[in-house]
Amino acid sequence: MRGVDWIQVPTTLMAMVDCTVGKVAINFKNRKNILGAFNSPNKVIIDFNLLETMPEYFIKEGLVESVKCAFSFNDTDLKDKIMDYIENKQLRLLRKIIERSIVWKISVVQNDFYDTNNIQKAVSYGHTFANVFEEYKSAVME
């Protein structure tokens, strides 16, 4: 089923800001996301109305992903939008944060789609840290 056309419909803020490439992976031999594939969606449909009923926890989780982009690319405009949202909680700001984060993610993915030159580390270091932490936690609990 490689290369199947698909449409991505992200339903959390995290998924909305991280929806530029379809990366799917599975755990293998106690390693997180070690086997996977890249296949971009043919289309991404973001329903901003979902943000209105999204629990605050999911909003914070998604903002962290945008903060990574803001600091990775020294994007003062994105940092300002995030701070403005934190202070005012206006949903219109989340839309701008999503759009700006996607622009950065697309620029990274277009330059190195298969991550052969490790360019994507600029936006994936948080995932990497979380994966290592999760692997460590699993090893300690066994």
Image (tube, rainbow, N blue to C red):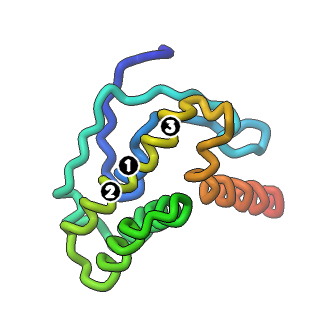
Residue matched to label 2: 98
Q: Amino acid at mark 3?
A: Val
The residue carrying pointer 2 sits among few (fewer than 14), some (14 to 19) or many (20 or more) residues within 10 Å by Cα, namely: many
Residue matched to label 3: 109
Closest to the observer, 43 or 136: 43
Residue matched to label 1: 102
Q: Secondary structure at mark 2?
A: helix
Q: Secondary structure at mark 3?
A: helix
* 79 vs 45: above or below: below
At x 25%, y 83%, the residue is 88
- Count of picture labels: 3
Q: Earlier in the sequence, mark 3 or mark 2?
A: 2
Residue 23: x and y in percent read 52, 35
Separation of disc 3 and disc 2 at Cα?
A: 16 Å
* 22 vs 85: above or below: above
The residue carrying pointer 1 sits among few (fewer than 14), some (14 to 19) or many (20 or more) residues within 10 Å by Cα, namely: some
Are circles 2 and 1 on residues that touch, CB within 8 Å?
A: yes
